[in-house]
Image: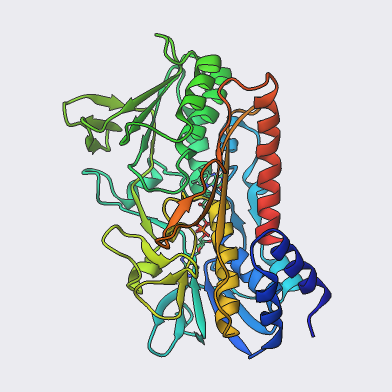
Amino acid sequence: MISQSRRQFLKWAAASGLISLSACSGLSKTAAPAQVVVIGGGFGGATVAKYIRLLDNSIKVILIEPKAKYITCPASNWLFAGMVGLQDLSVDYQALTSQYGVQVVSSSVTSVDTTRRRVLLADQQSITYDRLIMAPGIDFHWDRLPGYNQELADKFPHAWQAGRQTRLLQQQLQAMPAGGLVVITVPADPYRCPPGPYERASMIACWLKQHNPRAKLIILDAKTSFSKQKLFEAGWAKYFGYGSANSLIEWHALTDNPIIGLDAKTATLETYFGDKFQAQVLNIIPPQQAGLIARQTELTDAGGWCPVAPQSGLSTFQDNIHIIGDAANYAPIPKSAFAANSEAKVCALAVVSLLNQQPLPEAQWLNTCYSLVTPEHGISVAGVYQLSTERKIAAVPSAGGVSALNGISNQPQLEANYAKSVYRSLVADSFA
Ligand SMILES: Cc1cc2nc3c(=O)[nH]c(=O)nc-3n(C[C@H](O)[C@H](O)[C@H](O)COP(=O)(O)OP(=O)(O)OC[C@H]3O[C@@H](n4cnc5c(N)ncnc54)[C@H](O)[C@@H]3O)c2cc1C
């Protein structure tokens, strides 16, 4: 018997093009008891756990996540402009348990036995799976910058995993002497949230303009261009004098003159041609790779990310393991929470279909990423993706785009409002 809520969800999924009605009717026929284990309760893991249960509540879903409360990276940059506190960004897993029947286990997975199909937890417990979904997010390459290491993240916070690191960076900014220099280093692609460093620079600049107006912020970028660049630069020119001699923000593309070392004692970065940047607050965002458990399970390639068959999210290296979110390579879809949520829904449909011996539904993915230049000035990028005839992910032409540079006069204010409501609905869709 198909439940009312599941019937409604399937109708919605079919109407929104996520699945075809013929696939739905197939799903309801078989109800073999199956066990799915999900590693990681971020945007990817929470969404996939919820949506598998919505699609087929005969499947047992066990979500393993060490943190009782998850603090979202989306909106964490807003902290620097004083718009939110960490408590506003904190979600828990109660709704997943009480509303959807997901079993949440508060622990970490230390290893995966792919032969016996079981995961081993930090407390030595083991849990078997029919299908395993990995969503462990990112880890950092700590060894790419001479003079820098993991311990130094307490001195030069990355704040690229929200929580303690975000608060640390905020405290350093607030304690910075008048007229100090903030330096943000940005890695080469791919990394989590391509526009994130530039939104961060904007939010910090808003705060400095009000509380430390003689201070300066320099972005040292390993790339020659960046996401929503024209929109950010237009906003920076409007609010922070960007492009003038007195600009609060400077952006330096260091592709030909990379950073070659850090003197941790003096907080000084040195480039290949000998330029030196001594910062009072140094926000080093290291290059990234898939989370440790994905690497230990040998799901990653030489680039450090997990290749997948996009329609199912199945690992190309291991049977019965799906990977979603930042850890996986769904390029050209960027690594974002919105994308992780979208990948999770496609994966949920695939897992339910496979467990019910149904064909895989056609897949489509969405990404939308809003950034704030000031609390009242928003900009956005959106994309729709599907499989090409070569079965590779490709952007659907004309289905996305970025905000107009010279749109209607109240567009930035509207987009700032949308940024806040998109954040709320994305969190609700993933965790509530
Ligand atoms: C500053 C900043 C701003 C951002 N802003 C936006 C935005 O506006 N919009 C947007 O869409 N995206 C944004 N992002 C990107 C977004 O945060 C990520 O893309 C998203 O969190 C990816 O989700 P995920 O589930 O893959 O990983 P995560 O959210 O990192 O979740 C991974 C989870 O796995 C758990 N885990 C790891 N290893 C194990 C293990 N061995 N056992 C059990 N659990 C484990 C971790 O504890 C963690 O909770 C931003 C990112 C940053 C840094």
Which quadrant would the C terminus be assigned to in this image? bottom right
Splitting the image into 4 quarters, where does residue 8 fall?
bottom right
Residue 357 showing in the rendered view: yes
Q: Is residue 151 left or right of residue 207?
A: left
Seen in the image, is 45 located left or right of residue 429? left
Residue positioned most to the front: 389
Relative image position of residue 421 (x, y in whole percent): 71, 42
Give the vertical position of 357 relative to 186 (above or below).
below
**Compared to 156, does 390 lie above or below?**
below
46 is higher (above) or lower (below) than 393: below
Q: How many marks?
A: 0
75 vs 266, left or right, is right
Q: Please identify the residue farthest to the top as the structure is shown.
A: 245
* Figure colour scheme: rainbow
Q: Residue at x 66, y 69 (%)?
A: 20
> The N terminus appears in which quarter of the rendering?
bottom right
Rendered location of residue 229, percent (x, y): 45, 29
Percent coordinates x, y for residue 133 in the rendering:
50, 73
